[in-house]
Image (tube, helix red, strand yellow):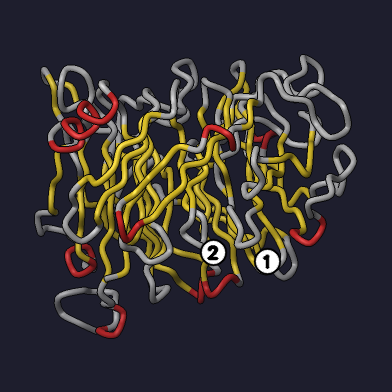
Amino acid sequence: MSAASPGYAVGELSNHEIWVVDQSDTTADGGGTLYIYQSSQVAGQSPAAAPEVVDLGGATRDLCLAATGTAPRRPHMLFFNAAHSHAVLAFVVTGHVVFYNAESRAPVGCIDVGAQAHAAFPSPDQSFVAVSNQNGKLVQRIETDYPTNTFTLNDAATLNLATCTTPSGALCEDPVLRPDNAPICPAALTASGLFVQTLRGGGLFVIDATATPMAIVGEYDKNAVHPNGCGGVEHGDTVYFNSGGATAGVLHADVYRLPLNAFSSTPNPPNTPAPTLVFSHDDRGFVDSHGMVLVDGGRYLWVDDRAANKVIVVNTSRNRVVNEFSLAGAVSSDPAPDLMDIAPNGARVYVSLRGPNPLSGNDPALGNAVGNTPGLGVIKINQNGATGALVSVARITNVVDGVERADPHAVAVRRT
């Protein structure tokens, strides 16, 4: 064991960065803060090294004002392109999607998609980004040329989920089938260009992102898929996705799976194939399924529950829950785990931990996204992924008028 990193073998200290975004305001009209940790800084049980800090109310705000005439607010979801040369950050209160040179940290492109960019997911072939414009009820496509820093919103590709008709002839948004088609996340964007689009009011669309306009090839109603999912991963020929959060005071925690080979350019009938329910914890009450990550080369799927402060472990070969472990304990009594990503060497999982005043995904009457240690959590993977333990928290703070406002949400690992 390394004396500098108790609990970790020397070989586990692979070079990578962990980017964490605090979505709390740094200026009167928004901003937010990006924290970048080197892997060595958070390898031990008591992270002490200061991260690199980027004020998103500075150069990012200036670029967006110049490019779009408006300032971005509440940085929410962050992903890297396949080459890890660029980061893509969506701002959930506004419609801004900002592209960053990952090495220099400089913003190099800003696109305003309209009402609200909840999530923007880069395609595996690096040719486009799929955007879930939540309150605009649009799914949009930004064409990307990373070597030249050229990013273009393709209006012809837009799919309007409020006004469209499904292949079966049903209304996309329907008071019985799909009562609220605000798109949450373009989960699990695959190499074939398909992605699973979760919906705020329940139901789901499988969308061909390469078509112009983007095309629905699978349609599901609220009885088949519960509301508000955001997690999604691709494993082999399977896509796993979840439901979570609060809808009308009711919390959800479900994980489903669909076979990728069941979809092509020819649309399927409604609710076909039926999604397989891997687990449902809806009957447990205080639950909120959110982040997902594959560990041990995909042998296990970890799903965190930010209300229950735990991780549910699914064996992907058997598609059943084989363990649950709590993240609450001596390191944090109420971590509220949100999104997760894994170190390139598979030694540990990083998780964003919410603050006492969450700005998104929280029902104030329930407090499902409330935590008391805002920051970056480090989870040590044990028994090859069958279980784990929260070993440290790199705290993030933003105290305004005596009140802790820090609210980390996005987290992503960058290979260096």
Residue topped by disc 2: 294
Give the residue type that dot 1 points to: Thr
Horizontal and vertical percent for residue 294?
A: 54, 64
Mark 2 surroundings within 10 Å by alpha-carbon count, few (fewer than 14), some (14 through 19), many (20 or more): many
Circle number at residue 341: none
User: Marks 2 and 1: in contact by CB < 8 Å?
Assistant: yes
- The answer to whether 382 is drawn above or below residue 76 in the figure is below
In the rendered image, is residue 293 in sight? yes
Q: N-terminal of the two: label 1 or label 2?
A: 2
Horizontal and vertical percent for residue 94?
A: 37, 24
Comparing 414 with 164, the one in front is: 164
Q: Secondary structure at mark 1?
A: loop
The quarter of the displayed image where residue 379 is located: bottom left
In the rendered image, is residue 329 in sight? no
- Left or right of 3? Residue 23 is right
Q: CA distance from mark 1 to mark 2?
A: 9 Å
The residue depicted at 32 percent of the width and 34 percent of the height is 75
- The answer to whether 202 is drawn above or below residue 349 in the figure is above
- Left or right of 110? Residue 127 is right
Horizontal and vertical percent for residue 356?
A: 30, 28
The quarter of the displayed image where residue 22 is located: top left
Horizontal and vertical percent for residue 131?
A: 50, 38
Residue topped by disc 1: 316
Give the residue type that dot 2 points to: Leu
- Left or right of 255? Residue 346 is left
- The answer to whether 161 is drawn above or below residue 256 in the figure is above
Q: Secondary structure at mark 2?
A: strand
The residue depicted at 45 percent of the width and 25 percent of the height is 362
**Quadrant in which the N terminus appears:** bottom left
